[in-house]
Image (cartoon, rainbow, N blue to C red):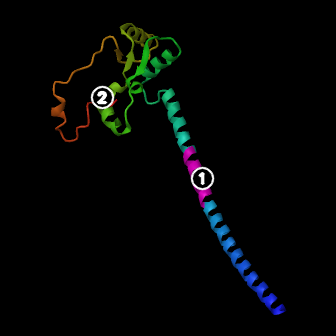
Amino acid sequence: RAEKSLKDYSEKEGKIKAELSEIEGSIASKRDEAAKIEEEINSLNFDRMSKKQRADTLRRMDELFEGYNHSVKAIMRASDHGEIKGIYGPVSKLIDVKEKHAVAIETAVGANIQNIVVTDENAAKSAISYLKQNNAGRATFYPLTSISPLTLNIGRDTLEKYKGYIGIASELV
């Protein structure tokens, strides 16, 4: 009877050791999985931080009109400080372009991208006067009361036949 009892205990011990080994393997596997997830979290956090930093830099550049002509910066600062009324801003700030069309639109617009849209001729005259008084250079203004859209002298169906045709630029912004 003692031998049977000893044998039963030995079997139970073997089962318990097997279960323990399985649990320890599962724990090790979960630790590896947790380490991989933690590494991924750290990578995502780093990526998020670098993108946030880039966005902050771009936002500051945008606010300071980095890359714009001195005259455009001067007009926008004066407008922000209430020294000039009726300024909407440079064309580049007023159009929203899908990234896939950005190069094409920038090429089509060219240097006009920095031209300043204003409410009317009086706002343009006021801005020009400001530039002269402050020796701040020259700029081109588009008074909304003086500009009108151009109509195409070619049909859309004809345009659509051309290889690479995507659309009319004014409809892509």
Q: Amino acid at mark 2?
A: Glu
Residue 89, located in which quarter of the rendered image?
A: top left
The residue positioned farthest toward the right in the image shown? 2
Residue appearing at x 45%, y 10% in the figure = 133
- Residue contact between numbered discs 2 and 1, judged by CB atoms under 8 Å: no
The residue positioned farthest toward the top in the image shown? 122
Q: Which residue is mark 2?
A: 171
Q: Is residue 7 magenta?
A: no
Q: Secondary structure at mark 1?
A: helix
Q: In the displayed structure, would residue 21 be above or below residue 60? A: below
Q: Amino acid at mark 1?
A: Ile
Residue segment shown in magenta: 36-48
In which quadrant will I find the N terminus? bottom right
Residue appearing at x 40%, y 22% in the figure = 90
- How far across and how far down the image is residue 39, in percent? 60, 57
In 3D space, how far apart are the residues under numbered discs 2 and 1 (Cα atoms)?
41 Å
Residue 156, located in which quarter of the rendered image?
A: top left
Q: Which residue is mark 1?
A: 41
Q: Is residue 16 visible?
A: yes
- How far across and how far down the image is residue 171, in percent? 30, 28
In which quadrant will I find the C terminus? top left
The 10 Å Cα crowd at callout 1, few under 14, some 14 to 19, many 20 or more, is few
Q: In the displayed structure, would residue 79 be above or below residue 45? A: above
Residue appearing at x 56%, y 50% in the figure = 44
